Structure formats: structure tokens, C-alpha cells
Image: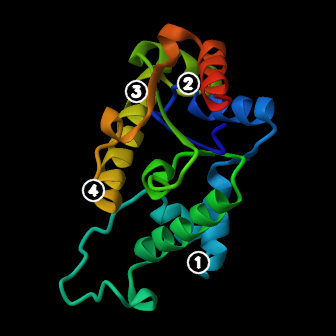
Amino acid sequence: MKKIITISREFGSSGGTIGKAVADRLGYEYYDKEIILRSAREANLDIASLEKWDERIPMNFGFAQSLFDFYNKPLNEKLFEAQKKVIREIGEKGNCVIVGRNANTILGEYDNTLHIFIHAHPYWRLQHLKEKMPDTSEAKIMERMKDVDKKRKKYCAYYTNTVFGMSDYYDLSLCSSSLGVDTCIDLICELAQK
């Protein structure tokens, strides 16, 4: 049985919804943005700093910056290090579903893991997000989808030296628009229980 399930996802593909349902069905703990809040507390960052640096890479990480001096690192570096520590602590406990935050790479060497990538067709994502953001125009939603996915790709490449969404870094990739959210939940739970 898989004790750790990580879910990476395209924005609007229902990855969070799927992850929460999988955790509920398996009786596992569920973690997403709360990891960041816990990380921020550990790194002594305020909420404004958290929002500014969440899933962002440094704009100008200088050569004089010591990679080993945690306290002099830019805030985004400190946040990632704190987040990585929290994710590993969660992984040690097991019986968890972690959505996002490059958990698949951070916990890549752990046993009993299942790393999932959720994606969906852009039109389906747009329709899904329109339900969540009814007062936002389609053009703004599409712009937001592209922006969030682009930031996730850069963040993943910078901090983990991997490619966001590339099959090499996941055990399974599921298209929620083709399979349906319920089928994705069923498949993940079935695989986790083997």
C-alpha cells in the first residue's frame, strides 16, 4: 500500500479536488497551501512575503550569495528550504496526500510513494474555472491559467532541476477532462491500495 501520494497539477485541472477526495477515501491526511503557511512560520516570514514569493524564483540570485547561508538567502530561497523541510516531515509520517509544492521530487527517494500528474484540456479547464470565478472574463481566466502554469514550470525547473509535467518525474499522468474527476479518484485509490 502506498503511504505517500503526491499530486502535481495544471491550474484548473481539479488536482486539488481529486487529491482531497483521495485523502478522504483512504483516510489519509491532506496537505496543500497549508504547507506554505507552516513553512512561512518556520522561516519567520510574514504573510505579505509569503504571497509575494509563493511559487516564484529569484529574479537576481547573485554569485556573492552563499548557497549555504540560510539566513542571508532571499526570502523565496528561505521559503523553499522551510517548505522542503515540512514536506519531508509530513512524508516521514506517511498516510498523506500532498498537492503541489514539488513534493514528487522532494519525496522522490521515499519508499511507498505514488506520484501523480493531473492535466486537462484547456477548454475544460476554462469551463471549470468559470464556475469557481463567475465574475471573471474568459480572457482573464485564460491569462491566469497560462500565468500560473508558466510560474509552476519555472519554479519546478529552478528548485528541482526537473520538468513540470514530464512523465519521467511521475508514476502516472491522468487527464481529468477525458477520464472525469471521479475516475481519476478511483484510479489513484486503486493504485494506492496495491
Task: Return the residue nearer the eye: 171 or 140.
Answer: 171
- Amino acid type at circle 4 is Asn
Q: Secondary structure at mark 2?
A: helix
**87 vs 182: above or below:** below
Drawn side of residue 65 relative to residue 188, left or right = left
Given this view, does label 4 or label 1 mark the residue nearer the observer? 4
Q: Earlier in the sequence, mark 3 or mark 1?
A: 1
Given this view, does label 3 or label 1 mark the residue nearer the observer? 1
The residue shown at (62%, 17%) is 181
Q: Earlier in the sequence, mark 4 or mark 1?
A: 1
Badge 1: residue crowd in 10 Å (few <14, some 14–19, many ≥20): some
Disc number for residue 129 = 2
Q: Earlier in the sequence, mark 1 or mark 2?
A: 1
> Which of the 4 image quadrants contains residue 68?
bottom left
- Amino acid type at circle 1 is Leu
> In this figure, which residue is indicated by the disc labeled 4?
161
The percent position of residue 125, horizontal first and vertical second, equals: 48, 20
The percent position of residue 75, horizontal first and vertical second, equals: 45, 77
Asked if marks 4 and 1 touch (Cβ < 8 Å), the reply is no
Task: Return the residue nearer the eye: 52 or 94.
Answer: 94
Q: Earlier in the sequence, mark 3 or mark 2?
A: 2
**144 vs 35: above or below:** above
